[in-house]
Amino acid sequence: MSEREEIASDDGAKKPTPPSGPGFGPPGLHGTGVKAKDFKGSFKRLAGRLRPELWKICLIVTLAITSVVLTVAAPKILAQATDLIFEGAISSQLPAGATKEQAIAALKAEGQDQLASMLSSMELHPGQGVDMGAVGDVLLFVLGLYLAGALFTWLQAYLMAGVVQRVVYGLRREVDLKLARLPLQYFDGHARGDTLSRLTNDIDNIQQTLQQTLTQIITAVLTLVGVLAMMFWISPLLAVISLITVPLSVVVTMLIAKRSQKQFAVQWKATGSLSGHVEEMFTGHNIVKVFGRQKEAIARFDEENDQLFRASFKAQFISGIIMPSMMFIGNLNYAAIAVLGGLRVASGTMSLGHVQAFIQYSRQFTQPITQTASVANVLQSALASSERVFELLDEAEETPDAAEPVVLTKISGRLSLKDVSFRYAPDTPLIEDLDLEVSPGQTVAIVGPTGAGKTTLVNLLMRFYEIDGGSIFIDEVDTRNMTRADLRRLFGMVLQDAWLFGGTIRENIAYGKDGATEEEIQAAAEAAHVDHFVRTLAEGYDTRLDDDSAHVSQGERQLLTIARAFLVDPQILILDEATSSVDTRTEVLIQKAMSRLLRGRTSFVIAHRLSTIRDADVILVMNEGSIIEKGTHEELLAARGFYYDLYNSQFAEALAEAS
Amino acid sequence: MMRLLAVLVRDYRKALVLVVLLALAQTFANLYLPDLNAKIINDGVAKGDTGYILRMGGFMLLVTVLLVAVSVMLAYWGSKVAMSFGRDLRSDLFRKVESFSQNEVNQFGAPSLITRSTNDVQQVQMMVAIGLTMMIVAPLMGFGGIVMAVRQDVPLSALLVVIIPVMGVVLGLIIVRAVPLFRSMQVKLDRINQVTREVLTGMRVIRAFARGEYEEQRFDEANLDLTDTGLRVARLFALMFPALFGIFNLSTVAIMYFGAFRVDSGEMPIGNLTAFLAYVMQILMSVMMATMMLAMVPRASASGDRIQQVLEVTPSIGDPATPLRLVATDGARRGRIEFKGVEFGYPGAENPVLCDISFTVAPGRTTAIVGSTGSGKSTLISLIPRFYDVTGGSIEIDGHDIRAVNRDDLWSQIGFVPQKAFLFTGTIASNLRFGSQAASDADLWHALSIAQAKEFVADMSDGLEAPVKQGGSNLSGGQRQRLAIARALVKRPDIYVFDDSFSALDFKTDSMLRAALKSEVSGAAVIIVAQRVSSIMQADQIVVLDQGTVSGIGTHRELLEACETYREIVYSQLSAEEVA
């Protein structure tokens, strides 16, 4: 485990995301308050990604407009039905045979002036009942409107789903392809969790927002305009009243929502803080106990728990009064319209159906306004997400491969480094003017204390990082004149961090070679001393290696990576000897397999074991990132330098003890 | 889940009664408004009585004000009860887990315990909050709405027999289809996550084997799969709203049509038709709400069960009723540990992990434990601080069975350095002071210098106050390990236990550390578990474990001659000449 510090920590990826679930915020307001830095730029860029779907989007917008028009028109037409019924009801109470004028005159004579003036504006046929035929016609028409409206709403949402999914699929794919083109430097310098989250959480966020908001905005705005127009058409007076109460409800809602958002942010923070504490205390359970810190752990938990309680209570309460207060203002409006409308119907200046329709409209009026407000919030968070995705897409890529690359198929394995210099950070020189000649079949050992930068050389050989000066030749060909893929194919690599992917054992061994035959795979496994083990598994080579499979130990995983290297049969090998966390018997196997693998190949070994060091043809001693000594075992011992100390610290005791 | 709800009812009975009363009041007020509107139309408008219209209007206003007051109170108490309940649950869980021994922790696994005390509680708490504010109201509204609708006109109410089931069936069908889709969506999302994570962790290998294209294909498969499922989910949702609103609107049309006949026949006043419409809308809204809520229940209920499982466990290790004190008899040196025929097996396992292990660790001496993976080394030393209890035999410290003393007392004697150096969020100093709050800065620096950590800590810009991120993720494995060693040293205990604590160090640091350690802890009993032979060759006593039994005890030289297992281990690591 000595080389861990040189590889960017993976801990970021394992950090649990704060708990989330339905209802963790007011519905539709699941933005976490993160705002885009460049709102306009990100918006334009995100919108640009929708361009290929332009025609579809036009169609969707047309459908949305149609469905809004239909839905907005319906109540006004439904009002006719109400009026017909009302008139019928009134008419049937009037004496049959009389005309409307006679009936009104009769009422006036009785002193019922109010009623008379109401009736005067109605179409009455005294003595007759409701004109059911007319009512049926109107209702049938309304039915048609509603059905068509529903159909169009469904169609546009259906099409939208396709558009959004295609756009998001493309975005995901593009990010994945981008990852392949980024230099390793990027991955070493960025937490994996962060990159992972851009590809998953952020893109998810974008997807949900696109799905929800795009048509929502159109529908909301159109509904708003349509409803307002209808309201003014029916009764300017009542419309003005609604225009006072409705925006009031919007303002109140927004004020409360703002406060509740703040509280949700506080709650979010408190949750994160509590989860962090719980996570630490549970994973460090034994440490907390053995250091006698349980009381403190519980005390701190209680404190954090109480904070979370207070924050979530406030958040829940405040968001809980949004609905009642909206309903309150809605009901105020309802009462006002019921009374004023009633009075106007009574005075004959408005029909009952219109009051009915008006109530329906005023209820439809609030929703789009609050929707638009919440959409703005969601959009903010989605833009922040897309900004993070675009940021990743804009990262500098690896320099392109040579235009006319040299292709080496069979090589001798001769390697030479000439005046190579390299630095990770521009102002801290690491490797300066390194010269190294490696003949075919030679072994180069790289040794040094923890954190000495032993993987740097590997990074340069395989062009994970580009050298700043000098050149590296393989069989006299400058490695920069080959494509990276071709260059890397010449190498075999076994790292101590045995990387296997979630596939079968067969797929993992065959990883480096397309179309490897069953015999080849088994031969490689046998050479790596892992064939026997694989056959003890219930599913043999078909065993799936999903996340941290329990039945395959670290050592066995290591053997599988060795088998993988055997199968590729490379001319140059890079081995990172892994010794810790492997039991002794497996270690013997690994050692045997590794030395077999080394036979006849040029190799670079990051050495932990002394036998490797001593037998190496060249030993590179590294400390604090740079190569400080170079030579054979005997030469370096004779020089009595850093290597001499290092070697003695390991073995002086052993020798003293034994002699 | 039901058990948890019983606790909720027990602990918050009064508040719950209040919530129910408030919900009832809210429902009444809500249902009363359309009735008033009907009165305005029937007795005011239709009769041209303006005074009546105004009076009823004023009454509507009053009801509205009452309604908002009741609703706010309901929101207040509903949230209060739900969030208090969540707080209690978290607290119970945390205390419960703190009382667990390693056995119970293993039973669930730490990550699962964490999710249970955070996300699962969150789920249940949310469910209760929604339940108290909406779920109680929905059936009340539904039922009240039906009663009120029937009061408006009985024959017209026959329509409800059609409308409500249709709504229920449509919603039910959508939910039945949506739930498995959501589940499958989660699986696909996990898959994308897994593939991406693999690509990110294996970037070097992928590039070394030039397998970019293959990985691309793997990702694309997962991506297509996810897109496909996502599309199906989105399309289902596209259907949901038009379907629901369609039912609403169709109901309106149907009621108008049949209502017209009733009004025409003079059996129903027209105001009742308006009110009837309002009630049907309320009924449908409550059916919709209830169905949506019901869809949430299984998830919250699963969370509740997961919480209940933890709360039901009785920890297998506790303190004795009348504890002995761990004080040395007659001033003898403290820290003598005796393993007497120790046997240990995991609960339910067929074979014990450790069998008949006896040896003594004397104060001032170093005892090393070696053996291959799975030989039981780590298990053996985790018995000393009672992370597990022996299942046979006993462990005694200074003559006392460790099960006869309080665990706090026992733990105060032990400096433990775990295999995985676990650090806590805070600073270097706060981590080092974990075992001894009173330690001075000089003490800390001293411990750091022994642990070979002085240099890198001094190099940090904030020195002792340098921040440590969660899990020590801003430090390297070797640095974390050295800090964990320093942490144990600051405590100055009588017994040191190092569980393979040098594995992340290179040979040089390892040997320097051991040399410094030797003089520092000279009076204490030291137990070291190690993989590397070079780390333990000089121990006063080496215990060789093989498959849970002792296969040899002695010094390096003695064991080389007498113990086959030991020789095997040694030869696997050193060449012959280095050994002899």
Image: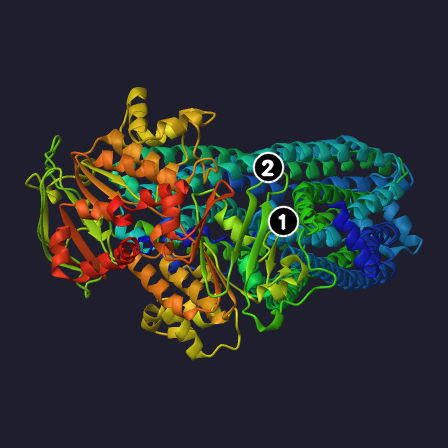
Disc 1 packing (10 Å; few <14; some 14–19; many ≥20): some
Amino acid under disc 1: Gly
Q: Indicate the position of residue A422 as horizontal and vertical percent values.
A: 16, 57
Query: Where, by quadrant of the figure, is residue A238 drawn?
Result: bottom right
Say which chain tag 1 marks. B
Q: Indicate the position of residue B561 as horizontal and vertical percent values.
A: 37, 45
Query: Where, by quadrant of the figure, is residue B180 drawn?
Result: top right
Residue B128 versus residue B333 in the image, above or below: above
Q: Nearer the viewer, residue A460 or A194?
A: A460
In the rendering, which numbered label is found on residue B442? none
- Circle 1 — which element? strand
Which residue in the protein does label 2 denote?
A149
- Circle 2 — which element? helix
Which residue in the protein does label 1 denote?
B393
Label 2 in the same subunit as label 1: no
Query: Where, by quadrant of the figure, is residue A90 drawn?
Result: top right
Q: Nearer the viewer, residue A94 or A133?
A: A133
Q: How many marks?
A: 2
Q: Nearer the viewer, residue A100 or A652?
A: A652
Q: Indicate the position of residue A654 as horizontal and vertical percent values.
A: 29, 54
